[in-house]
Amino acid sequence: MQKSINYKLEQIGIIKTPYQNNAPYQPIEADKEEFYITINHRYVDGLKDLTKFHYIYLIYYADRIIRKTEMVVYPPWAEGKKVGVFASRSPVRPNPIGLSVVRIKNIVENKIYTSGLDVFNGTPLLDIKPYIKDLDNKTDANYGWIEEMDDMEHLMLHIKGIPHDY
């Protein structure tokens, strides 16, 4: 029998976005709104040399998830396709931890200005990790079950968060 362990995560900052009640499914890099992260002052020294990277992973707590977690989900852009939650990017998960890759635009004191994000304003930030070329880019990655869909070109617009007409 597997032992259950309680974990304590500490918020290291807060994510600021223009989204109060609706957010895109994926970050939109070209979004012209202002996006930034305010890092708690005690973690500012941890930002040393972060500006030398173009992209970062933001790991956050999706604190506004109110739906019950299901093990089988229907991705909203996948035309009724049913998949396991772990084969999806659904934010409704057993642990509401989110992950986004964003471009660093600037860092000023304890604020990291970024490209577009796909989270609500005020989302708690748990961690930041640099996105490292070659290490984080797997050339043999694929699209999994998405490759089986009829209208993959249209679905890719949804996956990439590209605004478009249906």
Image (spheres, rainbow, N blue to C red):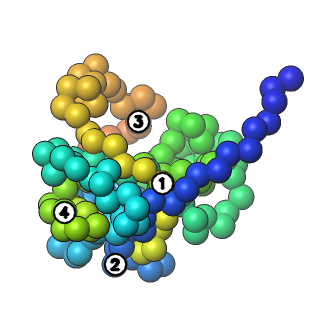
Amino acid type of the residue tagged 3 in the rendering: Ile
Q: List x then y, in percent, for residue 27.
A: 31, 58
Q: Amino acid at mark 2?
A: Pro
> Which residue is the site of mark 4?
107
Residue at the top extreme, as displayed: 140
Three-letter code, disc 4: Ile
Residues 134 and 109: in front is: 109
Residue mark closest to the camera, 3 vs 1: 1
Q: Which residue is mark 2?
A: 18
Mark 3 and mark 2: span between their CA atoms? 30 Å
Residue bearing mark 1 = 126
Q: Quadrant of the C terminus?
A: bottom left
68 vs 108, left or right, is right
Tag 4 or tag 1, which sits nearer the N-term? 4
Q: Residues within 10 Å of mark 1 (few under 14, many from 20)?
A: some
Q: Residue at x 27, y 42 (%)?
A: 130
Which sits in the foreground, 112 or 138? 112
Q: Residue furthest right?
A: 1
Which residue is drawn at the image coordinates 37% and 66% (left, top)?
A: 41
In contact (CB < 8 Å): disc 1 and disc 2: no
Residues under labels 4 and 2: Cα distance?
Answer: 19 Å
Label 1 vs label 4: CA separation?
A: 18 Å
How far across and how far down the image is residue 161, in percent?
30, 57
**Residue name at image x 42 percent, y 75 percent:** 121
- For this rendering, which residue is in front, 16 or 12? 12
Horizontally, residue 124 falls left or right of residue 111, namely right
Of callouts 3 and 2, the N-terminal one: 2
Give the amino acid type for the residue marked by disc 1 in the picture. Leu
Q: Mark on residue 146?
A: 3
Where disc 3 sits, the SS reads helix
Rendering quarter of residue 114: bottom left
